[in-house]
Image (tube, rainbow, N blue to C red):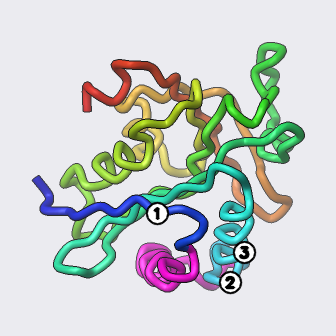
Amino acid sequence: MTGLQIQRRGAEDLDEIRPQLLAVYAEVYRERLDEDFHSVERFDERLGWNAEVPGFAAAVGYQHDRPVGYAFGCVLQPGTNWWSGLRTQVPEGTTSETGKRTFALSELMVVETLRGTGGAKEIHDALLEGRTEERVTLLVERDHPRVRARYEEWGYRQLGEVVPFPDAPVYDAMLLQLGESTLRCA
């Protein structure tokens, strides 16, 4: 066990948790903060956009009252731009959103000392616990095959290649089908 205390939060809590999320982000991405796309300011913009979408939810992990990781996302709405950078042909209807079909896991990260402990999975599962959508999607940078492999261990399957913003790196879009037994096997 990691000794994590995990708090689930909503959009109404963003002002309170925003500094914590930004601090963890800056620690995790400290080597890449000079890249425009990975700057704290750009991350903060993306965080704000997520919190404005219905169904925003976050799970923040703490050790000794210090934030050490988090996950957040929102429910994809009809007409979402989430799939607009998809470069791969997918079956018809795969990217159709109803506002109730897909939870988009926008960020999941833990500080270095928590990596390899199962903490990321604990935070992931806390965020998804009780979700009513039929599936979850996330994006993994193409240059991180070990991270993609970890998500595959958790049941995610690769859907295709996507570039979500013009200045973003290439990502693999992944899907996890939610069901009664999905999170019990964790």
Q: Residues within 10 Å of mark 3 (few under 14, many from 20)?
A: few
Rendered image: mark on residue 41: 2
Which of the 4 image quadrants contains residue 86?
top right
Horizontal side of 138 relative to 144 (left or right) equals: right
Image quarter (top left, top right, bottom left or bottom right) of the C terminus? top left
Horizontal side of 59 relative to 132 (left or right) equals: left
Identify the residue under disc 3: 45
Q: Amino acid at mark 1?
A: Arg
Disc 3, disc 2: CB below 8 Å? yes
Residue 69 x/y as whole percent: 36, 66
Q: Residue at x 62, y 44 (%)?
A: 104
Q: Amino acid at mark 2?
A: Glu
103 and 138: which one is in front? 103
What range of the chain is rendered magenta?
14-35
Q: Residues within 10 Å of mark 2 (few under 14, many from 20)?
A: few
Identify the residue under disc 1: 9
Q: Residue at x 73, y 63 (%)?
A: 52
In space, the residues marked 1 and 2 are separated at their CA atoms by 22 Å
85 and 120: which one is in front? 120
